[in-house]
């Protein structure tokens, strides 16, 4: 009877119940988190989303929102039998407001499509990440995604100027005017960003665009060790205003990428660590980058790229890490953490021993956005449900003032460790906000602070 009611709202063709069809919605991108669901609903408008939420609230049916399903912390899959609400059909990109440098996009629009729309209008979008072709804007907002250029432009929250969403109450809130200065109360768009669907379903957003930086140059620097790479990134942040990306890689990870992808080594001789940097602007930044790199300590070799194809090839050494690690058998433990700059180099050196102490023989793959302190700690050789590694890494990170989640979100995977970063008073405030906007606890109830 309830499925018939959902069909009346979204259309029978958009109520998916076939086992083989819904299966792809019930497992996350890593393969580590698997659940089950009775149905997947695919609403095509904010009105349909509101009607779906109203029905779910009336019948006490919990929901999990889903976009491109590229999450890595179990936050977008029905681990407890929840109904999946896929927002992929909300895929309209509005016209670019060229005067304001803004656009409005539906939750189901991919990051790549936002980037393309901005580019066609003579602007650019400040967020970029490896999953750009499948990751959706709604998912980016849900987790406050960061990516490659946070050090230049900030995270998703920094790009967000307004939101349209259906709260857990069934109410539709909409504030998409895009005023840069608007001090008329609570910033609901900022609150919903990073809430992982626990307060409501984001259906559209107003995004800030940035001036294009068409002149680009990238370089892979072979570094003496990880400490030298971290120090070099920190120095470039201070001395190179055109710096737009700084990515750390280690020898084992680069060699794995080359082995899996068939790419040649990036440099003539291997280095223990690599720093991938990009500078961009309206004028050729190559002289500035060359001068800045020449003053760095610990550089053993370098490969420079100025044309788009060669730049993309250099970035594949970094972006290929995720796919390469995933090829090693059982789903890896993917732990994205942020570390204070003062201890970043020390922790990069220390984390493998932290893992070794609880999981002898496990392999640790470290890489990430070193320019903003975000290190991806991937661990293979450990069973997917063995959380000893997660516990050890998160506690080590929290002890030095770091965060257990840099950009993937908390999801279900990190929920029990949230108290390492948030006080009891903060968690009570979270719960109060959750209850106010989702009084029946149906919105992604097992994620973040949760209600289930």
Image (cartoon, rainbow, N blue to C red):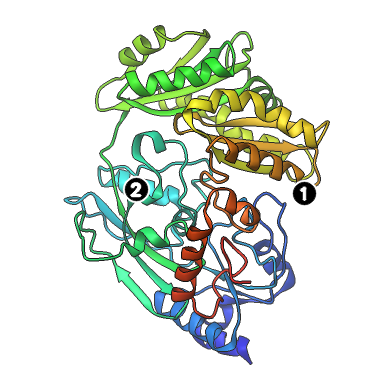
Q: Reply above or below: 36 against 105.
A: below
Q: Residue at the spot x=40%, y=75% of the render?
A: 46
Q: What residue would you read off at disc 1?
A: 384
Above or below, 348 relative to 388: above
Which residue is at a point 31% across and 71% down the rendered structure image?
A: 174
Residues under labels 1 and 2: Cα distance?
A: 34 Å
Q: Dot 2: few (<14), some (14–19), or many (≥20) neighbours within 10 Å? A: some
Q: Secondary structure at mark 2?
A: helix
Q: Closer to the camera, 427 or 75?
A: 427
Q: Which element type, helix, strand or loop, lies under badge 1?
A: loop
Query: How would you rate the neighbour count of disc 1 (Cα within 10 Å): few for under 14, some for 14-19, many for 20 or more?
Result: some
Q: In the rendered structure, find residue 273 and report the number of the disc placed on it.
A: none
- Name the quadrant of the C terminus: bottom right
The residue that appears at 58% across and 45% down in the rendered structure is 404
Residue 17 spot, x, y in % from top left: 68, 76
Q: Is residue 411 left or right of residue 289?
A: right
Q: Residue furthest right?
A: 361
Residue 180: name its quadrant. Answer: bottom left
Task: Indicate which disc, 1 or 2, sits on the residue closer to the N terminus.
Answer: 2
Q: Who's the residue at 69% across and 59% down the image? A: 27
Q: Position of residue 240 (x, y in %)?
A: 33, 20
Q: Which mark is residue 158?
A: 2
| Residue 201 appears in view | yes
């Amino acid at each position: 009877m309830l499925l018939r009611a959902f069909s009346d709202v979204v259309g029978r063709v958009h109520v998916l119940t076939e086992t083989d069809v819904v299966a792809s919605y019930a497992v996350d991108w890593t393969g580590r988190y698997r659940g089950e669901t009775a149905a997947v609903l695919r609403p095509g408008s904010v009105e349909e989303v509101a009607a779906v939420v109203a029905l779910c609230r009336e019948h006490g049916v919990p929901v999990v929102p889903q976009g491109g399903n590229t999450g890595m912390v179990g936050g977008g899959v029905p681990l407890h039998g929840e109904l999946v609400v896929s927002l992929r059909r909300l895929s309209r990109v509005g016209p670019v407001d060229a005067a304001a440098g803004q656009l409005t996009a539906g939750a189901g629009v991919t990051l790549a499509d936002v980037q393309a729309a901005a580019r066609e209008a003579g602007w650019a979008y400040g967020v970029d990440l490896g999953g750009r072709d499948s990751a959706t804007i709604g998912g980016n907002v849900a987790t406050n995604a960061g990516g490659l250029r946070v050090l230049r432009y900030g995270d998703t929250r920094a790009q967000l100027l307004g939101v349209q969403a259906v709260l857990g109450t069934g109410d539709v809130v909409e504030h998409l005017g895009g005023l840069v200065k608007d001090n008329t109360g609570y910033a609901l768009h900022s609150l919903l960003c990073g809430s992982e669907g626990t307060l409501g379903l984001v259906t559209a957003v107003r995004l800030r665009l940035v001036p294009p930086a068409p002149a680009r140059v990238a370089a892979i620097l072979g570094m003496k060790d990880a400490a030298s790479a971290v120090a070099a990134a920190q120095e470039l942040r201070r001395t190179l205003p055109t710096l737009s990306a700084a990515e750390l890689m280690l020898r084992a990870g680069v060699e794995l990428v080359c082995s899996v992808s068939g790419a040649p080594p990036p440099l003539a001789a291997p280095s223990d660590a690599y720093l991938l940097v990009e500078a961009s602007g309206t004028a050729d930044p190559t002289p500035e980058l060359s001068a800045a790199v020449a003053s760095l300590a610990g550089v053993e070799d370098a490969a420079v790229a100025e044309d788009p194809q060669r730049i993309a090839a250099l970035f594949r050494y970094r972006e290929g890490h995720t796919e390469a690690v995933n090829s090693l058998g059982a789903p890896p433990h993917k732990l994205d953490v942020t570390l204070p700059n003062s201890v970043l180099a020390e922790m990069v050196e220390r984390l493998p021993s932290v893992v070794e102490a609880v999981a002898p023989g496990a392999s640790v793959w470290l890489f990430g956005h070193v320019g903003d302190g975000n290190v991806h700690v991937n661990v293979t050789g450990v069973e997917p449900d063995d959380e000893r590694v997660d516990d050890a890494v998160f506690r080590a990170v929290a002890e030095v003032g770091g965060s257990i989640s840099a950009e993937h979100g908390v999801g279900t995977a990190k929920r029990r460790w949230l108290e390492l970063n948030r006080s009891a008073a903060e968690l009570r405030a979270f719960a109060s906000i959750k209850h106010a906007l989702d009084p029946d606890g149906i919105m992604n109830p097992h994620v973040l602070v949760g209600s289930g």
